[in-house]
Amino acid sequence: MAVSSKLKSVKGEKPKLPSQMPVDELPYYATASQSTVPKAATVVEKKGVQPITYKWEKLTKEQQDAVMKVWKLEEITPEEEKILPYEEWGRYVFDPRRRFRKPEAFDGVRILELCRPDWYNFSLHFGGSLLAELGAEVIRIEQPDKGDPIRWVGPAVEEGGAVKAKGENYPPHGSALYALYESRNRSFISVDVTKAKGREIIKKLAKRADVVMENYDPGYLDSLGIGYRQLRKINRRLIYAAVTGFGSFGPDAWRKPFDSAIQVMTTVPSFAGPFDLSKPTLEEGQEAGYLPSRAGWPLGFATGGVSTAVGVAAALYYREKTGKGQMIDVASYAHCLRWCDCSFPWYSLTGNTRRQFGNLDFEINPYGLHRAKPDQFGDRFSVIAAIGPVWPRLCDCIGTENMKKWETQYPMNSDRIGWKQQQDINAEIDKWTMAHILPEIDQEGMKWGFAGAGCRNIKEICESPHFLDRASIEEVDDPLYGRMLVQGCRPNFAYTQARIKWLNKPMGWDNTEVLRKYCGFYDSDLRDLEKAGVVGKKGGA
């Protein structure tokens, strides 16, 4: 059987990390990683400044001097800030290279993160990471015998899907990569909440906490006497986020949370998947190609994590005004529904149930992915989107007789979203994109002012000057797990900044420090609790 270019392998050599590059080879955009920030000034001295939106030679000497100071990470005066080109002012104010010079927005906020041992619910972890990046002290509490299931989630171990730190005993393969990706900036303790002495520890910690976040079944911790109704009696300012798949009440509330269920139960896969654009009607095209497709990453859990972080931030602000804590009912599914744009009003007004539209869009045309000319990775695709005044620019760029005709025949988006127009316009765009490789489409999009970005893979993202410059992808030197590329923190702030301090720790790594500090335990107390199985061993059993 012939091998399709669509199946070409993307496996390759391990990438060279920024810290492994000598200064003479190091591009400035790679100096945003923690280990390379000190080299930024030297790189500028050797290679200069690379402007994007302005001409260097048109700047005054004073402006050039100010820009050089920005790139060298030197402080500038208010007068110098005023004369910076906007591009450089944005770099000075938001540059992630300065992230450890700024205070943290949630510095002083203490959060307990209680992780259930029997079921994986990533919403809790993602929400906790967002808050920890912004400076909150997040203490993850795991069951001593099993730990958090996130430690087991990742690619196959034999494919490099886990990393083991010195002193890490459990899991036996070390922590799976999901744990390294979404455990950043935590302290880690292991306490058995099913034991009476374990619950007393939780109460001691909650008394000195600002927030408790947990992902157990609705009411489970309440049944143990450490739910919100009990903890608020010992801490009236406590904010308590119950992070579940489907909420704290309702017919589906007791379903086990898993991302695929969140996606399918909130219509997301029914919007996605292929269809046949060659059929005479939309209905026939959708029936011919019907294959619901889930997002290949934890969309449902991630939206629940965003909801968790926003909810906690809002509750903290409300407490600042009123002094009152409160409980937050986080259902991971909710924001998946919220993101379904006009689909529900459309159903309400017309009875129409939205279905898949492949890589195109049933609300905007043109707005979709189109096949480009193959390259070393095989088949490639690029987004092409144009609406409003951008539509004529796309027509002028492609320049065929049909596009010139349709430019005036279909001037408004509402003129172009019919089935026949979708077929004609997108087929014409396909012809154009299939004659060009992704960089050519990208350049034409920038030149003419329409969206023409290629569908990039991980390798391309990790080599992208834009994402590296902004530390959207950054190298982190974790003290226990070593150096690796990870997704950075967002958003950027002018006066505070999110940042990664470390990626992960083994189970129970901070038992002694946390329980001494917040519970007043002596070493002898900790040894007794460990022998009784109330507190786990450092590094896991």
Image: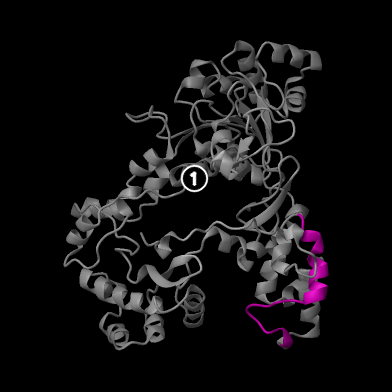
Q: Position of residue 256 (x, y in %)?
A: 41, 30
Three-letter amino acid code of the residue under disc 1: Ala
- Picture quadrant where residue 154 is located: top right
Residue 55 in picture, x, y percent from top left: 68, 84
Stretch in magenta: 35-57
Q: Which sits in the foreground, 20 or 37? A: 20
Residue 128 picture location, percent across and down:
59, 39
The relative height of residue 216 versus residue 312 in the rendered view (above or below) is above
User: Looking at the figure, which quarter contains the C terminus?
Assistant: top right
Q: Quadrant of residue 372?
A: bottom left
**Magenta segment: does it hold 56?**
yes
**Quadrant where the image shows the N terminus:** bottom left
- Judged left or right of residue 238, residue 107 is right
Does the rendering let one see residue 127?
A: no
Farthest residue toward the front?
1
Residue located 20% across and 63% down the image:
282
Q: Which residue in the protein does label 1 denote?
A: 302
